[in-house]
Image: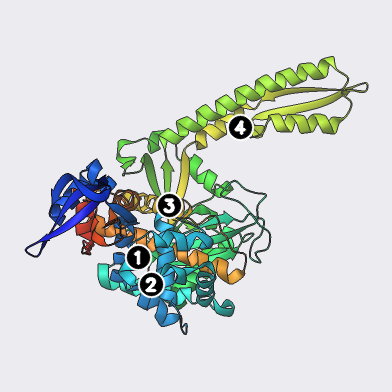
């Protein structure tokens, strides 16, 4: 079967026909009359089996998700912004290649070798006029090289311009910023910045690198990122972040929020010198433990100390203490939920340890164990996680080693007094406990940013080993995260209660369909009919409904 077009008074009407032989001659037999082009499209979209069999659909292209992200790139002026800082003579410019790679990371991360195939089945070629064969792996890698030529970081200059664009378009403020660090690992061993270090991915045997990220409190827009060798500890990264804020972004006054793992004498001193205010967690050293234990439950659990926000329900009391050479606001917090969990978890672990220790003690008593070192090592393994709560004694009876243990009630009591308690510190002594806690817990947004970079936008796997290309790959991930946060901001501003990831999933079902005759002549090209939700998202983002071809 095939479609047959007949012109009547200048208008084209379609019928479904099949080829038959009558008296030995080929003829068309009419199977079904369709009507005008619009009627044909309606039949195809409704799933009319005869119409679908008769027509040819050589192209079904991704439209909704990639068109939405490309629209955001246009809003941010990303192509021109990148090209202002990265000059490439001839061929496809670096700016458009970078945003193509960023869009791919948002919707379907693929390797550079598979990128051309992915691009071919999106509507991006029709939107931009750039042919898929121009985006082969060699050209894409060359574009990455232009972002970090001979170790010269072009990405930071682009990020500075992005910040100015965010201020201009959305009024985003730089008065409160979050800083955190994550790691990502390599499968290979050739990358020069890859080192063994503390792995947040649970891969301590893999070489890794560390990535620092600064985001805004408002909407979690990325400000800039930093790349560190894999063995660089968190504490040593803070100084570079502070100097970048001061020297590169000319931010003279802000509130910087970071985790307790970055607190050190040097970092606090550098922050004081910078003039930045800050909020951070405090490590439970001896002085902090003393502060936490000096507050009795009778004072702590008063109703006026109850603090509620969207993340936590806890009790908190305020103190002003001299820490790191200056008076600081300290908020002593008590989370009853965490306290109950800690107590229960410790009890379960101690019970298991007691059972295993009792069995091992009996085994020693009935055996002939002579090597003390092996016995101590075995006991240590059994007590993993609960070692402070047991007193162990070893003795020798002739050549045999015996062992006994008992719980340390004083240590258990001390632990229970600290369960669920922690301390926050800030230079802003005028902030209330509730305000300080709320600001600190808002930093979870940056942890979600790292989750976003590792899952939806494909930080891993890193398929490069040259230093510059690895860093350029991280910059592409930064651009992807920027697109996702801008998408989320625009959806929120438009009154839609859907996050970026789910909106892209919905838009992925909006396709651009080309319908032809069996001879290849285009009958029409049209978008699949968007659902109400898809149409709302496209309208909020200003995504155009692409014109049909005939």
Instruction: State yes or no: discs 2 and 3 in contact (Cβ < 8 Å).
Output: no
Front residue of this view, candidates 436 and 42: 42
Mark nearer the viewer, 3 or 1: 1
Q: Which of marks 4 and 3 is in front?
A: 3
| Residue behind mark 4 | 411
Does the CB distance between marks 2 and 1 fall below 8 Å?
yes
Sequence-earlier tag: 4 or 3: 4
Q: First in sequence: mark 2 or mark 1? A: 1
What separation in Å lies between label 2 and label 3 (alpha carbons)? 26 Å
Query: Residue at position x 64%, y 30% from top?
Result: 389
Marks 4 and 2, the one that precedes in the sequence: 2
Q: What element carries label 2?
A: loop
What is the residue that sits farthest to the front in this orientation? Answer: 23
- Work out whether mark 2 precedes mark 3 in sequence or the reverse, and give the earlier one: 2
The residue shown at (15%, 56%) is 37
Pointers 4 and 3 in contact (CB under 8 A)?
A: no
Q: In this view, does 419 lie above or below 329?
A: above
The picture places residue 32, in percent across and down from the top left corner, at 17, 44
Q: Look at discs 4 and 1 and give the one toward the viewer.
A: 1
Residue 454 screen position, x and y as percent:
48, 53
Vertical comparison of 401 with 463: above or below: above
Q: Label 1: which residue?
A: 124
* Position of residue 179 in the picture relative to residue 312 (left or right): right
Which residue is disc 3 drawn over? 456
């Amino acid at each position: 079967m095939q479609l047959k077009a007949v012109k009547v008074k200048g208008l084209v009407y379609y019928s479904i026909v099949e080829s038959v032989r009558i008296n030995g001659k080929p003829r068309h037999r009419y199977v079904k009359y369709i009507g005008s082009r619009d009627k044909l499209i309606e039949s195809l979209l409704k799933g009319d089996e005869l119409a679908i069999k008769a027509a040819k659909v050589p192209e079904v292209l991704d439209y909704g998700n990639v068109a939405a992200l490309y629209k955001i790139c246009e809003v941010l002026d990303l192509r021109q912004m990148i090209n202002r800082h990265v000059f490439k003579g001839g061929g496809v410019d670096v700016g458009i290649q970078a945003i193509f790679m960023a869009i791919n990371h948002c919707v379907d991360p693929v390797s550079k070798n598979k990128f051309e195939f992915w691009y071919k089945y999106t509507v991006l070629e029709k939107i931009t006029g750039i042919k898929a064969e121009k985006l082969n792996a060699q050209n894409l890698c060359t574009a990455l090289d232009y972002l970090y030529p001979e170790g010269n970081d072009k990405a930071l200059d682009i990020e500075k311009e992005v910040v100015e664009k965010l201020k201009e378009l959305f009024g985003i403020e730089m008065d409160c910023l979050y800083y955190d660090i994550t790691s990502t690992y390599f499968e290979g061993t050739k990358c020069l910045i890859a080192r063994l270090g503390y792995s947040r991915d649970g891969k301590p045997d893999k070489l890794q690198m560390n990535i620092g990220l600064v985001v805004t409190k408002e909407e979690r827009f990325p400000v800039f990122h930093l790349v560190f060798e894999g063995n660089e500890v968190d504490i040593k990264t803070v100084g570079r972040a502070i100097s970048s804020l001061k020297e590169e972004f000319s931010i003279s006054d802000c509130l910087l929020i970071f985790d307790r793992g970055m607190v050190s004498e040097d970092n606090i001193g550098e922050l004081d010198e910078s003039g930045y205010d800050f909020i951070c967690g405090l490590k439970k050293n001896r002085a902090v433990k003393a502060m936490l234990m000096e507050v009795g439950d009778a004072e702590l659990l008063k109703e006026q100390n109850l603090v509620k926000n969207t993340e936590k329900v806890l009790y908190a009391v305020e103190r002003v203490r001299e820490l790191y050479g200056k008076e600081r606001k300290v908020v002593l917090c008590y989370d009853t939920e965490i306290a109950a969990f800690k107590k229960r978890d410790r009890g379960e672990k101690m019970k298991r340890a007691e059972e295993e220790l009792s069995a091992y003690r009996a085994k020693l008593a009935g055996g002939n164990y002579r090597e003390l070192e092996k016995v101590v090592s075995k006991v240590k393994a059994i007590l993993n996680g609960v070692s402070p709560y047991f007193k162990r004694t070893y003795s020798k009876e002739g050549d045999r080693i015996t062992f006994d243990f008992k719980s340390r009630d004083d240590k258990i009591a001390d632990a229970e007094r600290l369960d669920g308690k922690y301390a926050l510190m800030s230079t802003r002594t005028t902030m209330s406990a509730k305000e300080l806690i709320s600001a600190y817990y808002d930093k979870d947004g940056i942890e979600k940013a790292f989750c976003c970079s590792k899952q939806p936008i494909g930080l891993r796997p890193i398929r490069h080993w040259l230093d510059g290309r690895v860093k350029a790959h991280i910059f592409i991930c930064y651009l992807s995260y920027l697109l996702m946060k801008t998408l989320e901001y625009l959806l929120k501003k438009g009154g839609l209660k859907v996050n970026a990831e789910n909106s892209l999933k919905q838009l992925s079902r909006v396709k651009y369909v080309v319908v032809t005759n069996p001879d290849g002549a285009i009958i029409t090209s049209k978008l699949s009919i968007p659902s109400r939700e898809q149409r709302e998202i496209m309208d909020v983002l200003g995504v155009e409904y692409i014109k049909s071809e005939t």
